[in-house]
Image (cartoon, helix red, strand yellow):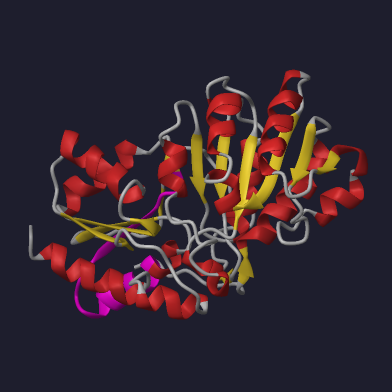
Amino acid sequence: MKKYTNTGNKDTRSGFGAGLAELGRTNENVVALCADLTGSLKMDEFKAENPERFFQVGIAEANMIGMAAGMTIGGKIPFTGTFANFSTGRVYDQIRQSVAYSGKNVKICASHAGLTLGEDGATHQILEDLGLMKMLPGMTVINTCDYNQTKAATMAIAELDGPVYLRFGRPKVANFTPEDQNFEIGKAVQLTEGTDVTIIATGHLVWEALEAAQELEAKGISAEVINIHTIKPLDEEAIIKSAKKTRCVVTAEEHNILGGLGESVARTLSLNAPTPQEYVATMDTFGESGTPEQLMEKYGLNAEAIVKATQKVIKRK
């Protein structure tokens, strides 16, 4: 099985900041708006280099979305930045009406998503954002796995004409994808080849899936790991091809079991290649305060949970 090396833990929000700064130097139409969280979203470098293209709107997220939608009319490419909870739940009406319905070229960039926000607790740990955003017609939904992929995705979405939701996180996690990668929106990345089970993971769970695959290999189980960085549009071809080969699937995501990647995969399989599937996700619950590691373990979002789900689904073949 192909092995991946962690080149050093880095937070994915810093990947967004690096990508945004690079866009500031290469695309004069890119503008950035932030709702009083410039440091947390790592937007400081863009702000310092492009003060005339940076807009601090304060704690007024709905206003930020409205401003961004208006800026697109003049040909600008606005990137909005705040926590995932405020980027979606707090401003869903504005996104639906002013961005999605109108097809505006707004890039909604959301940090501090999922349980790995940690000690801030349930009110900030949004676990339903992927579902909220993927249900909006015309919305592209991306959930990156590490620093390098987040930087590449940030730069790639500037080239896509239309609304995008880009989700990333706060904690330092393994950085293992290529620094010079070509990020292709809507195209899954097969990380390992396997014959016994397909593990389809997104975001922070991709590295956990790779670690689970190594544990499974030691148990004589061959796992095919697929990184789904784009939740919508979903790479259905890659999913169907792998599922037909291994004949069972595990999905893994830092999101509610309802409405996320797992449900999108299940719909794809039920229509094209009915396949036993197990889910690694939060089970229709809110989070709580704790360290990211404690919460991922308690809510079953780690390599150990993926191994258990794999052993269960193989028995269902």
Question: Residue 284 in magenta?
Answer: no
Q: Position of residue 228 (x, y in %)?
A: 41, 49
Q: Position of residue 268 (x, y in %)?
A: 25, 38
Q: Is residue 169 above or below residue 166?
A: below
**Residue 90: quarter of image:** top right
**Residue 50: quarter of image:** top right
Q: Is residue 160 above or below residue 84?
A: above
Q: Is residue 130 above or below residue 193?
A: above
- State the residue in front, 142 or 57: 57
Q: Which residues are magenta?
A: 209-230
- Image quadrant in which the C terminus is located: bottom left
Q: Is residue 187 visible?
A: no
- State the residue in front, 10 or 171: 171
Q: Position of residue 291 (x, y in %)?
A: 52, 79
Q: Is residue 1 above or below residue 186?
A: below
- Which residue does the image show at 37% across and 72% down from the upper left? 302
**Horizontal arrangement in the rendering, residue 312 relative to residue 224 (left or right):** left
Q: Position of residue 119 (x, y in %)?
A: 56, 75
Question: Residue 212 in magenta?
Answer: yes
- Image quadrant in which the N terminus is located: bottom left
**Horizontal arrangement in the rendering, residue 108 relative to residue 218 (left or right):** right
Q: Is residue 302 visible?
A: yes
- Which residue does the image show at 17% across and 45% down from the upper left? 244
**Horizontal arrangement in the rendering, residue 190 relative to residue 173 (left or right):** left
- Which residue does the image show at 65% across and 45% down from the upper left? 154
- State the residue in front, 103 or 211: 103
